[in-house]
Amino acid sequence: MQIYLVGGAVRDALLGLPVKDRDFVVVGARPQDLLDQGFKQVGHDFPVFLHPVTHEEYALARTEKKSGSGYTGFNCSFGPEVTLEEDLKRRDLTINAIAQDESGQLHDPYGGIKDLQERTLRHISPAFCEDPLRVLRAARFAARLAPLGFTLHPDTHELLRRMAASGELCALTPERVYMEVQKALAAPAPALFFTLLQDCGALAQVLPPVAALFADGRWRRVEQALNAAAKADLAVPQRLALLTAALNDAEFKKLQDLLPLTREERDLTCILRKGAADAAMLPDLICRGDPLKAGEFLQQLFTRLDLYRRGQRLKPWLQCAAVWEPDAAPLLETLQDLYQRSAAVQAKTFAAQGLKGAAIGQAQAAARVQLLSDAVGKIQKRTAQEHAVNYKDRHA
């Protein structure tokens, strides 16, 4: 029985990246051999075992043969006769098919180390096309490794085109698509994931509302926002919101129907998406608009974002707004101050005045609008004075 560290752990170690998860393949063993050593079996379609101490995954070496459509249509064979080379050949990219034995020696039958050195993402064999999920995986690896200079090999890019044209992508479940989308959004170059899927003809099949962004030029702004979000290290829900910020309401609803978002994810995406769009109005409203209208808008904005009950949403909203509308970024600290002032207007103040029921809420809202309007007026007056001083200095 031989045990090899395989896949991402070997790849990332060779690239000098942090190793998060370690997976092992066991060659020359039967299930009972691992059970006798205290391993716990967790796999059903093929034997995967958890180490009794580390709880890391150990899988018996196996081969796969296409038996149906989609990414689940495979027959797996395992046993002591399956070699390491046969197990590695069923994997997707050469850089993911490098193994390391217990002495530290590397086993690289398909040229993965050379491709790591040349920064190339290349499929191992024509069997790559048997699993439609690999179209998304290849694009995701490109998004993750782009900062290191990795690009898709031309032959692999052409294979992705043929796979997209085959229609097998329709067999992917929303859960698997969303899993890849989440991982891609977390990557250093998230926009590249969607661009590559669009280039190979896959995006319209798995995420048609996003594909629509490419048709009329809206993608450029979304691409810039996603890249800026990655640079600012924004969280995945914020990046998802920015991905949807340029969608119209019908497209956004269709995307929500396609992706199995939790209720919390749906709510947060809606909030952050609307906030990003509202950010475009802030410079004119706060710096040049009518103070009363600005106060009314801000009160409606804070209420619509439900910030008076969920103040923790303010920071991620401000971050999304700054990425989506860079011109509004200088105003966001001011906006935070305005929110905190308006949130300090408590309902109990008006209850103490004898108001009841809906009258309390109406009075509270009116007071907040007045406070915000007065604050905006002071900001505009101070800004005008600063401009006047600067003008005099420049022309003195």
Image (cartoon, rainbow, N blue to C red):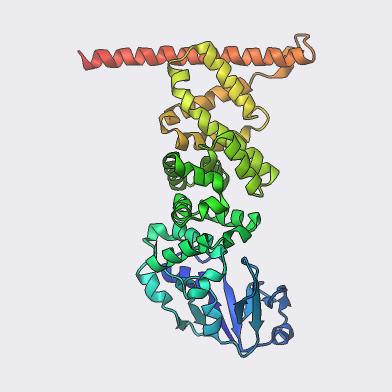
Query: In this rendering, is residue 1 above or below 197?
Result: below
| Residue found at x 56% / y 64% | 132
Query: In this rendering, is residue 104 above or below 329?
Result: below
Q: Which residue lies furthest to the left in this view?
A: 396
Q: Where is residue 229 in the image (x, y as percent from the top left)?
A: 47, 44
Asked whether 333 or 167 is in front, the reply is 167
| Residue found at x 72% / y 73% | 42
Query: In this rendering, is residue 394 above or below 124?
Result: above
Q: Position of residue 329 (x, y in %)?
A: 44, 31
Give the total of numbered labels: 0
Report if residue 204 is visible in the image: yes
Query: In this rendering, is residue 162 above or below 192?
Result: below
Q: Position of residue 244 (x, y in %)?
A: 54, 40
Asked whether 27 or 38 is in front, the reply is 27
Left or right, 260 with respect to 120, comes to right
Report if residue 102 is visible in the image: no
Q: Position of residue 148 (x, y in %)?
A: 38, 61
Left or right, 391 with respect to 312, comes to left
* Image quadrant in which you'd find residue 90: bottom right
* Image quadrant in which you'd find residue 304: top right
Quarter placement of the N terminus: bottom right
* Image quadrant in which you'd find residue 327: top left
| Residue found at x 54% / y 83% | 86
Asked whether 305 or 78 is in front, the reply is 78
Quarter placement of the C terminus: top left
